[in-house]
Amino acid sequence: MRIQIPSHVEYIIGKLNQNGYEAFAVGGCVRDTLLGRTPGDWDITTSARPEQVKALFRRTIDTGIQHGTVTVMLERTGYEVTTYRIDGEYEDGRHPRQVEFTSDLLEDLKRRDFTINAMAYSHETGIVDAFGGMEDLKKRVIRCVGEPMERFEEDALRILRAIRFSAQLDFSIEEKTREAITRIAPNLAKVSRERVQMELTKLLCSDHPEQIRQVYETEISRYVSEEFSCLPWEKAEISPALPKEKYVRWAAFLRCACPTEQDSWQTDLSCEKAAGKNFCEEREKAVRAGGKILRDLKLDNETIGRVKTLTSWCGEKLLPEAPSVRRAMSKMEPEVWDALVELNQYGDEILCLTKEIRAAGDCLDLKHLAVNGRDLMSAGVRPGKDMGEILNKMLQEVLERPENNQKEILMSMFVK
C-alpha cells in the first residue's frame, strides 16, 4: 500500500536513505493517514544516531537529544527525527531512566503504547505493522502493544491516552486493555497535573466529548483530584456541536455541577425569594469548585476566567429585549457571549437581538463610551471612586438607551 506523505517528509526520509540509514514516518501520522484524517504533525524514526542526523541537515534543533530526538527545520516547519531506541527501566511511572539506541525498527515499535500508533511507513518498504495495527484500525479498537499492564506501568499517562483516542477516533477499548486501565489507575497520581489536563482537554474537545464518562467508569477520576471525582458527571451535557475551544468544552462539562432553577423550586423553601437565594448560593459554590479543579489542573488564567463566566451564567434566564441583552453582553467578551448563547440555548430571539446590537455598533463597555476619564477630569471630577461610579452610571444609561452615547448628553446627565 502506498500512502501520500508531505514533500518535506519524503525529502528527510530520502536523504537519510541515500546516506545508508533506514527512515520511516511513524506513529500517529501513519494512523491518521490510513483513517483518512489529516495528521497534526509528521514524526520520523531512523536508524541514524542524533549526531548523524545533525550532520545531514543544515538547520536542526536539539529538541530531546538525550532521548534521540532532533528537530529538522525546513522552510520554518519542524519535523522530529528520532533514533530507534529501547527504553530502559521506568522509575517514576512516566519516564525511562535511560534509553538505548538500536538499529532494529521492531525494537523501537514494540515500546510504543497502542497497536494503531506502532506502525511505520516509507515508500520503499511500505507499511511496517508488526503488532496488528491495521486490523485494529478495521475493528476500530484501542489495544496495547504487548501486555497492557506492562505498557501502563511504564507510563501511567497512557491510561488517559487510551480514553482520549477512543473519543477522538470513536473507537472502543479492547477488554484486556480496559481491565488494565482500571487496575493501574492509582499510578495516575504520579503524572503531572499539566499532562493530565492536556489529555482531558483533548478528550473534551473531541467529536465525542461524552466519553469523559469513561474517566469515571474506570475510576481514573479519583486520581485526577478529589473535586473532579465528586462532580455529578452523569448530568453532563456536552454537545459535539459546540465550538472546539477548551474554555467552551470545559464550561459545558463543569456546568453539570451547577443547579438549575427547577432544582431550587423542588426544595421545601417557602417563598420565591428564599428559593432564588438558595439557587444563587448553590451556583456560586459550583463555580468556585470548578475554578479550583481548573487551577489544580494548571489551566491558564484566561481559560479559567472564561469558564467561570460561563458557569456563573448557567441557567440564567434572559428577557428577549435589547436592553437586557446589551447588559448581559457587556459582562463578557464577544466570543464568550456567543458560547453562552449556545450553552444556555437562548434561541432565535436572543440571536437576532445580538446581531442587531452588533450591527448598530451599540456601546457595550467603557472603552466605547463617548466620555472618558480625561473628560471628567476636565469637568473637575477627581480620579478615584467617584469617577468610576460616574463612568459606570453612564455605561448603564447607554446600555438602556444607546442613542444617549453622546458626550454632551452624558455630561449633562451625570456631571453637575
Image (tube, rainbow, N blue to C red):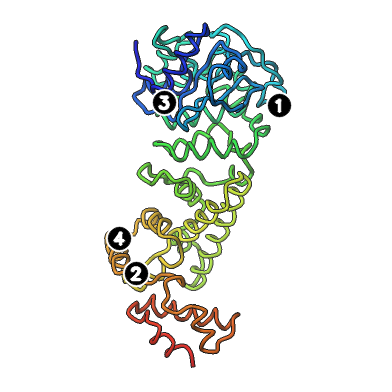
At label 2, the amino acid type is Leu
Q: Which mark is residue 319?
A: 2
Dots 3, 2 in contact, CB < 8 A: no
Q: Which residue is mark 4?
A: 351
**Helix, strand or loop status at disc 3:** loop
Q: Position of residue 318 (x, y in %)?
A: 37, 66
Q: Separation of disc 3 and disc 4 at Cα?
A: 36 Å
Q: Residue at x 56, y 27 (%)?
A: 159
The quadrant holding residue 100 is top right
Q: Does label 1 or label 4 sit earlier along the sequence? A: 1
Which class describes the residues within 10 Å of circle 2: few (<14), some (14-19), or many (20+)?
few
Residue 4 versus residue 337: which sits nearer the camera? 4
Which class describes the residues within 10 Å of circle 4: few (<14), some (14-19), or many (20+)?
some
Q: Which residue is mark 1?
A: 92
Q: Does label 3 or label 2 sit earlier along the sequence? A: 3
Q: Is residue 87 left or right of residue 340?
A: right
Q: Does label 4 or label 2 sit earlier along the sequence? A: 2
Q: Does label 3 or label 4 sit earlier along the sequence? A: 3
Q: Position of residue 182 (x, y in %)?
A: 58, 27
Q: In the rendered image, is residue 55 in sight?
A: yes
Q: Is residue 403 left or right of residue 168?
A: left
Dots 2, 1 in contact, CB < 8 A: no
Dots 1, 4 in contact, CB < 8 A: no
Q: Separation of disc 1 and disc 4 at Cα?
A: 52 Å
Residue 89 versus residue 143: which sits nearer the camera? 89
Q: Separation of disc 3 and disc 1 at Cα?
A: 29 Å
Q: Residue at x 43, y 68 (%)?
A: 330
Relative height, residue 186 to residue 248 (above, below): above
Q: Which residue is mark 3?
A: 171
